[in-house]
């Protein structure tokens, strides 16, 4: 899940404007941007200190998703404890 459509982002912005008001919204976005910047700098300096280049973590693909409800109904649950 995520924001697949820019219209969703616009909708969230309008809701935030209505809830927070035009005076507090710029302060909030400025503080959020500052926090993200500090976080990135901290990660970057930590990686440089350890001698590792910061990279994105590899995405693991799930080969065959398991439906837990189906496993319970069929009796193939990996956990053998009683409910």
Image (cartoon, rainbow, N blue to C red):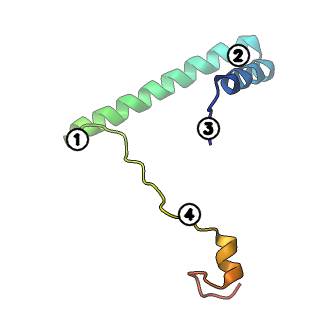
Mark 2 in CB contact with mark 3 (< 8 angstroms): no
For residue 5, above or below residue 17: below
Q: Position of residue 51 (x, y in %)?
A: 19, 40
Residue 52: assigned label: 1
Mark before the other along the chain sequence, 2 or 3: 3
**Distance between the alpha carbons at the discs numbered 1 and 3:** 29 Å
Residue 73: x %, y % from top left: 71, 80
Q: Secondary structure at mark 4?
A: loop
In the rendered image, which residue does mark 2 sit on?
Answer: 24
Disc 2 is placed on an element classified as helix
Q: Nearer the viewer, mark 4 or mark 1?
A: 4
First in residue order: circle 1 vs circle 2: 2
Q: Residue at x 36, y 28 (%)?
A: 41
Q: Of the residues under marks 1 and 3, which one precedes in the sequence?
A: 3
Q: CA distance from mark 4 to mark 1?
A: 33 Å
Please report the residue visible at 64 percent of the width from the left and 77 percent of the height from the top. Answer: 71
Q: Which mark is residue 2?
A: 3
Vertical side of 72 occupied by 3: above or below: above
Task: Identify residue for label 4.
Answer: 65
Mark 4 and 1 residues: CB-CB less than 8 Å, in contact? no
Label located before the other in sequence (4 or 3): 3
* Residue 50 as seen in the image, left or right of residue 20: left
- Measure the alpha-carbon separation of dots 4 and 3: 20 Å
Give the alpha-carbon distance from disc 2 to disc 3, as whole Å: 26 Å
């Amino acid at each position: 899940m995520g924001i697949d459509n820019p219209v969703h982002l616009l909708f969230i912005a309008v809701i935030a404007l209505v809830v927070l008001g035009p005076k507090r919204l710029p302060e909030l976005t400025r503080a959020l941007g500052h926090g993200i910047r500090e976080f990135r700098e901290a990660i970057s300096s930590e990686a440089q200190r350890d001698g590792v280049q910061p990279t994105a973590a590899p995405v693991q693909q799930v080969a065959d998703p398991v439906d837990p409800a189906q496993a319970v109904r069929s009796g193939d649950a990996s956990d053998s404890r009683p409910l």
